[in-house]
Image (cartoon, coloured by chain):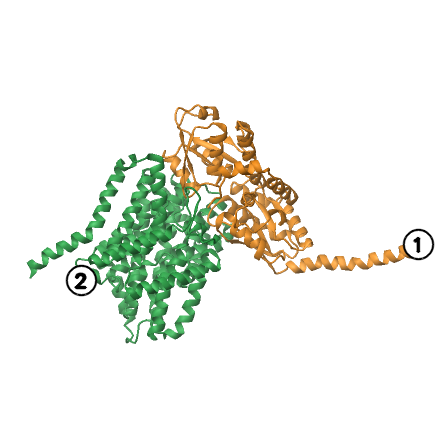
Amino acid sequence: MFDALIDGLFLVLQWKAFSLMMVGMGVGFVVGLLPGIGGPATLALMLPFIFKMSPAEAFAFLLGMHSVAATTGDITSVLFGVPGEGLSAATVIDGHPMAKRGEAGRALGAALMSSLVGALIGAVFLALAVPIVRPLVLSFGSPELFMLSVVGISCITSLSGLGARGQIRGFAMGCLGLLVSTIGQERQSGSLRFDMGMMYLWDGLDLIPVLVGIFAIPEIVDLAVRGTAIAGDRPAEDLQKGVIEGIKDTFRHFWLVFRCSAIGVFVGIMPGAGGGVAQWVAYAHAVQSAKDAKEREGFGKGDVRGVLGPGAANNSKEGGELIPTIAFGVPGSGAMAILLGGFLIMGIVPGPDMLTKHLAITYSMVWTLVIANIMCVILCLGILNHLAKITYVRGGLMIPFVLFLIFVGSYTANGQIADLIVTFLFGFLGYIMVLLGWPRPPMVLGFVLGKLIETYLFISVSRYGFSWLTHPIVVFLILLTALVIAYPFIQERRQRSRSPANA
Amino acid sequence: MRRMSILSLLVGFSMIPLMVSSARGQANFYEGKVITLVIGAKGAGSLIAATQITAHHLGKYIPGKPAVIVQEMPGAAHLLATNSVFNVAKPDGLTILASNPNVAVAQLAKVEQVRFDVRKFHWLGSTGADGVALSIRTDLPYKTFEDIRKADQDLIVGTTGPGSNAHDFPLLLKEFAGAKFRLVSGYPSNGDVQLAVQRKEVDVWAALATTIKLAVDQGIVRAIVRGRVASPGFENLPVDEDLATSSVGKAIMGIRALPLAIGRAFAAPPGTPADRVAILREAFAKVIKDPEFLAEGKKAKIDFQYISGEQALKDFTALLNQTPEVLKEMGKYIKLEG
């Protein structure tokens, strides 16, 4: 295994592979920065270039691009409130309010450093987990995956506001998300639901136009209404100081970053769990780290921990997602599906061989993730000062530019005009939700997990009847769900019992 | 008489520059242009990989050496892309559909959303047929289809849902050949079914022969039955149509076999000028013999063989020519894939 690790490093460091990785990183950097335009669309565009490359070169090129796009996507999320990548939306929740408060530098420093730490932890986990990863993945059947999705959706309690009113609103939004996820053709019988006679809706709604609409449009409207720059009329912050402060935050909350990275890797490893889930669960976990109600209320208004958690998970999951893709041929996200297409062209068959015979190639991918992330963060830290200045540019100048890129980004999801309509409709919904104080994250979580829950519940019941409820991992996950749901209430109660004592 | 023949000779000669300029015109037409191969899927899959490889080489066989790119337009099991190329794309020889011939079954079933007639496309050629095969976990004792018929309990078949090969192939074997199967549908992809086989959640799995072959080579499954199209390595397996115990079953299996026999076919929309269709047909016929193209196919484990556009059209016409009785029976078992 150690030999393969070293061989993998040498595969990446060969001049050709390394130069191609740099080219890929350059493309990924620009694409990640452009609001709304994500890595998967670019990966698909770049696929034809790999024909003449060796496998190590091709994956250095593609993964270098992909991992950098994931990191720089966070920058756009923080600065504009527009998910830079379809899947980096959770960073928007706290990152953008920080930018609005004039703390863009700090938020960016935190996002980048946590991304780097997340990527490194993810890679280490991945390297160490190779011998046990096959039995681990095989022990998670449909019932276990169903329960894992239920644990994910139980995070809604943490993503909703405090008190009965907050919880009810969060629950309602979660249900709305679940409902939206049922649009399209049902997988079991093939019957169509809520398709309104439109073929576009047969495959259900795509995550990217929905996320971009629900988060970006309200921010644009808000910017237009305020008529100021993103950071308002505040005096310019000392950006250098802010960035350093953000980096320090990462280490101040190192255990949170560590735990969220672990969440990212684990969710990434689970086949079919989907990349969109990891950072929302990590965000919910970050919210749970709030010590009291007052601290918890700060989430969503610019708590740096809300940036650190998803930032770390977003990059650590990249390593995790590679596992089901290379060992089982089941891609965990759109980007991984395109990477799998690259495997086919390269003549590599995903399977157990990738963890034994071709381990060096697998490790070369891990090394690419590590090297590309380190280089990207160093480069970004150098130019962050200039990037953060964007928040002081007058809104009137920013809006057309950002709006244009948002719609281009949505359009790249499926290349259909209907993508733009979905973006607009969910933008309207998002704006109403912001206006009336209904939380958006529970809805997104419901939407992301809805299809998984339905699919795996159906398969579990039709395959095992109800005997799956006695599977040991399922029982453990049921208990975990109960704990996750109860945690905010336990916390509140503990807080209440403590406060009279303090008084 | 003599004057007439001299006149006709003169007219004939005067046509030569016109013919030359027409050929040059086509060369000029494609020069500096981009040909788009539209495919109704995205992500991974042998159809996408085969289309990417075709795009990589097609341009060099078209006068003017245009660039060739792949545009993914996923949705409604390829219907969206097929509708779009048939109705929306400009018929100028620059937009080509990388089709999934299964859309003809949707046309046959008179699905409301079908806005095309496969018989009106200009079929340019196919890069090869891919068969379908049914396989079983290697650790189970069943080695032949007869063993499956005599199994003491139902075997669990994992499927991706109605309309897919993974679902319809075992369903028809269950209904018309006495296979002891219980279908568990709804797995998101073939990869997920294969994973379910490895964790013993599923016993039986059917898919395109290329996909099953990879799993057989890894020792995960053993192939038991195949469809009409014989893929390399599976030639000696029993064919589903021979196992059917009723003529209706055999006819429905036959309908399902036709699109697979047409394979990865390409088409230009109706109205495309005949000379450009001819150029494109010639290019497809040539690209299939290109050693680099074949080498890339071999690397991707895709078996390329040329099937002419005329043959594809003939097969589509045969597919759509069914008796009302067979259609009625088919409607009970075959639905569309999502």
Query: Which residue is labeled 2 in the image?
Result: A294
Element under disc 2: helix
Inspect this view and state whether residue A262 appears.
no
On the rendered structure, is B50 left or right of A9? right
Judging by colour alone, the chain drawn in orange in this rendered image is B
Q: CA distance from mark 2 to mark 1?
A: 108 Å
Inspect this view and state whether residue A280 appears.
yes
At label 2, the amino acid type is Lys
**Residue A348 placed where, x, y %?**
46, 42
Q: What chain is tagged by disc 1?
A: B
At label 1, the amino acid type is Met
Element under disc 1: loop
Crowd band around label 2 with a 10 angstrom C-alpha radius: few (<14), some (14–19), many (20+): few
Q: Nearer the viewer, residue A66 or B315?
A: B315
Q: Nearer the viewer, residue A133 or A35?
A: A35
**Residue B18 placed where, x, y %?**
76, 59
**B2 over B171 or under it: above or below:** below
Q: How many marks?
A: 2
Query: Which residue is labeled 1 in the image?
Result: B1
Quadrant (top left/top right/bottom left/bottom right) for the C terminus of chain A: bottom left
Chain A shade:
green
